[in-house]
Amino acid sequence: MTSTDTRSAGSTGPSDTQRGLVLADVTLTVGDGDSTITALDHVSMTVSPGELVAVVGPSGSGKSSLLAVAGALTTPDSGTVLIDGQDLGAMKDRERTRFRLEHIGFVFQSGNLVPALTAEDQLRLALHMRGGKPARDPRELLDEVGLSSKLGRRPHELSGGERQRIGIARALVCGPSLLLVDEPTSALDRARSQEIVELLARETRQSGVATVMVTHDHDILLHCDRVLEMIDGTLSAGSRPSA
Ligand SMILES: Nc1ncnc2c1ncn2[C@@H]1O[C@H](COP(=O)(O)OP(=O)(O)OP(=O)(O)O)[C@@H](O)[C@H]1O
């Protein structure tokens, strides 16, 4: 099977190549016994700081597996995963969990907010779980995503788009190196979807985070720096609709 390294142009030296996400020849098999499936088949990719990369592909092609491996939730059978030059495979379980809290932000399909918490407290909880000094001020970040007037609202008092904005702010509040985003627009109409991906693109650039977004929504690909396509566990350069 072929693997495609879709490194972006513009890297300037060894220290630069170490930053962001690097997957090198990663293979993951899932299931057991006779029903083993190769979910990721010799996958290589890099995502630089400040770059938004979309991953598209049919259902069952391995997109969630890719996020799980990049997010230090699943350990691949072989290959290397580096985040800011740190090798996830060389870490013990506890170390990897701590690394995930400190360096990786997740945005889920429908926000996955805590129902009882206000917008501001969703971010404060994330900071509390990570511990240490706050990386970003929750109020400033909520202002940046357009929710300064809704700090005290709970999820049921917000629209789907607003909940997704909080999900994005929560994923960024600890100042991650890598942002992993799973179908962020699946519950939104077209206009809200455009707003959410524009926000993700802006935050990716402003905060210099390396962002990987899995999506089925081809209308939002224009806002991404690159599009990769996953088919049967292999990754190749995909096409982006023209403006
Ligand atoms: N724990 C598991 N046990 C067995 N098979 C699994 C497991 N997890 C994933 N798979 C299989 O691995 C393949 C890749 O799954 P994955 O969830 O990564 O695909 P996907 O592209 O994210 O799909 P979707 O777009 O439907 O979410 C599929 O064939 C799936 O059935």
Image: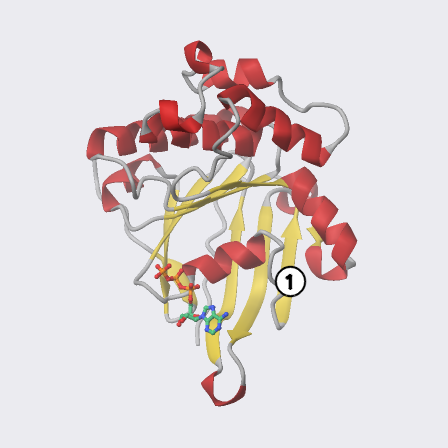
**Rendering coords of residue 35 (x, y %):** 46, 85
Is residue 84 in view from this perspective? no
Residue under numbered circle 1 = 80
| Image quarter of residue 194 | top left
Check the image and report above or below for 191 versus 111. Answer: above
Front residue of 130/9: it is 130
Q: Is residue 193 left or right of residue 174?
A: left
Front residue of 65/23: it is 65
Task: Inspect the image, locate mark 1, and give the three-letter code of the amino acid beneath it.
Answer: Thr
Q: Quadrant of ligand 1?
A: bottom left
Residue farthest to the bottom, as pictured = 34
Q: Is residue 134 left or right of residue 240?
A: right
Q: Secondary structure at mark 1?
A: strand
Look at 72% across and 52% down and name the residue there. 96
Look at 37% across and 40% down and name the residue there. 184
| Image quarter of residue 232 | bottom left
Front residue of 202/94: it is 94
**Rendering coords of residue 11 (x, y %):** 57, 41
| Image quarter of residue 202 | top left
**Rendering coords of residue 157 (x, y %):** 37, 22
Look at 66% across and 46% down and name the residue there. 100
